[in-house]
């Protein structure tokens, strides 16, 4: 209910004060010889913006050199792992270790590996005995 011809003129400059303060502070620091401070702030701002890009590119490079893909030596399930890491096959639960550019079964020191042979009894009765010969192999040499 303002009468016509009122002198209530308003300007909305709510965000202008912040910008004026920033420009004035930069001008003041440059005028009194503290330009190095403004330059260091600009350098730090540049580092904050470029550091994530450099970190992302570096991580992708490291990952491409250390990520190994290959099949499980037991069940041929496709696997992915990091060089030198131990893992379990999600299909057959065999402990595996990434060696070189593939996967090998991980066996603790002193473990003897054997291969199972299917023995059938053709025409034999339950009283007959089956002779099974087991050959113990010497431990495998390290590939180092």
Image (tube, grey):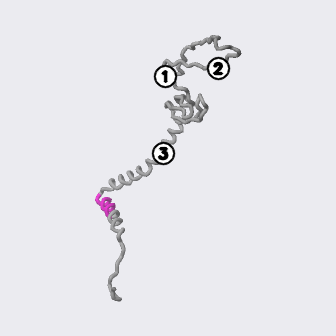
Q: Which residue is mark 1?
A: 108
* Quarter of the figure that contains the N terminus: bottom left
Q: Secondary structure at mark 2?
A: loop
Nearer to the camera, 1 or 131: 131
Nearer to the camera, 109 or 101: 109
Q: Which residue is mark 3?
A: 56
Circle 2 crowding by C-alpha within 10 Å: few under 14, some 14–19, many from 20: few
Tell me where the magenta segment starts and ends, as one range.
24-32
Among the two numbered marks 2 and 3 on one chain, the one whose residue lies closer to the N terminus = 3
Single out the mark in the foreground, 2 or 3.
2
Q: Secondary structure at mark 3?
A: helix
- Label placed on residue 96: none
Circle 1 crowding by C-alpha within 10 Å: few under 14, some 14–19, many from 20: few
> In terms of image quadrants, where is residue 136?
top right
**Spatial CA span between label 2 and label 1:** 26 Å
Q: Give the mark count.
A: 3
> In terms of image quadrants, where is residue 8?
bottom left
In this rendering, is residue 50 above or below 13?
above
Residue 59: % across, % down: 48, 42
């Amino acid at each position: 209910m303002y009468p016509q011809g009122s002198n209530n003129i308003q300007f909305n400059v709510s965000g202008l004060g912040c910008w004026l303060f920033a420009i004035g502070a930069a001008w003041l620091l440059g005028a009194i010889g503290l330009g190095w401070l403004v330059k260091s702030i600009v350098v730090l701002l540049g580092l904050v913006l470029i550091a994530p890009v450099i970190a992302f590119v570096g991580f992708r490079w490291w990952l491409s050199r250390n990520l190994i893909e290959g099949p499980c030596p037991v069940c041929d399930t496709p696997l992915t792992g990091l060089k030198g890491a131990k893992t379990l096959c999600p299909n057959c639960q065999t402990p595996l270790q990434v060696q070189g550019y593939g996967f090998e079964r991980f066996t603790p020191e002193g473990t003897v590996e054997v291969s199972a042979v299917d023995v059938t009894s053709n025409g034999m009765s339950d009283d007959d005995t089956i002779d099974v010969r087991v050959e113990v192999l010497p431990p495998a040499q390290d590939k180092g």
